Image (tube, rainbow, N blue to C red):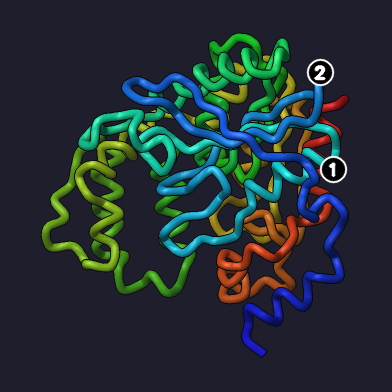
Amino acid sequence: MTIGAAITAAMIAVASPSTQEARVAEVAIEAKGPIGPLSGTMLAAGEGAPVVLIIPGSGPTDRDGNSPMGVKAGYLKLLAQGLAEKGIGSVRIDKRGMFGSKGAVAADGEVRIADYVSDVGSWVQAVRTRTGVDCVWLAGHSEGALVALAAAQAQQHLCGVVLIASPGRPMIPLMREQFQKNPGNAPILPDVLPVLDAMERGEVADTSKMDTRVAPIFSPVNQRYLIDANRYDPAKLAATYRGPLLIVQGGRDLQTTMDDANAIAAARADAALKVLPEMNHVLKVVPADNPVVNMMSYSHPDLPLAPGLVDAVAAFVTQ
């Protein structure tokens, strides 16, 4: 039996009704983009039902939570389906310039966090027009949580914000920790750390002699994006947002940690904090603190979401 098959077999027993295929039809929905439309998928749960706008994380992550970089966990689609079974509607989106929203910007257009924030505003307006709800809930995953917090600073017609696997620190210190805590990264650290240091100073580093395994991550375009993103401190944004806030963190997340969740919780003492000890970054249960097994779950869409995740979000949204 392969590791992947072992994970699947181990997890079948914990599947709950909320992880089964939702009996609600998916429909396409669009919002206004800067050039062309932004594209998403709506699961409507009925007239008057709350609606959650699900914002994906960093890189080429699509509306379902999948990525051409090997992530096929489908966790955002599963979240939407689970919420639908609780009577909660959702809209999950492709970020501007990617997938269904590729035509929203020029082919060579660079994107910043402020652009994603602007798109959240377009989506809130589109959802309210389409569904008739007065306010929309934001649920951001990973970097999407940072976008949600930034959008919540001035966006009207928000019911509240859900942060799932959110960074609690600026982007570059978090990346530095991620690279350093993986023993397998030791050979590339001499190349990576000076680039991170330069970006933290606001400088675009020369990567022409960088290890080819990581050079694409630090292309000039990506460096400029990360320099901009590093200006946003999630904990400070949480402190200045006054609406309802839920923080959800997995104990086996390899990309964000309890330090991140606690930093946000400390900034907003009245926020709700839900810890799921066995959940990883793609919102699945992994059976042990084993990085190899953990990463295998990233390519298994058949694994259900971590028990308690949908219930926590649903309880917060309907309270």
- Above or below: residue 177 compared with residue 154: below
Q: Picture coordinates of residue 289 (x, y %)?
A: 67, 71
Q: How crowded is mark 1: few (under 14 residues within 10 Å), some or many (20 or more)?
A: some
Please tell me which residue lies in front, 12 or 208.
Answer: 12
Q: Picture coordinates of residue 271 (x, y %)?
A: 75, 28
Instruction: Name the residue beneath numbered marker 1.
Output: 311
- Above or below: residue 90 compared with residue 291: above
Q: Return the residue found at the far bottom.
A: 1
Q: Picture coordinates of residue 207 (x, y %)?
A: 16, 55
Q: Label 1 amino acid?
A: Asp
Q: Picture coordinates of residue 248 (x, y %)?
A: 71, 42
Q: Label 2 amino acid?
A: Gly
Q: How crowded is mark 2: few (under 14 residues within 10 Å), some or many (20 or more)?
A: few
- Above or below: residue 101 compared with residue 77: above
Please tell me which residue lies in front, 296 or 190.
Answer: 296
Q: Can residue 236 be seen in this view?
A: no
Marks 2 and 1, how far apart at CA: 20 Å
Q: Can residue 193 be seen in this view?
A: yes
Q: Is residue 128 left or right of residue 219?
A: right
Q: Residue at x 40, y 53 (%)?
A: 176
Q: Quadrant of residue 231?
A: top left
Q: Which residue is drawn at 40% across and 29% down?
A: 113
Secondary-structure class at tag 2: loop
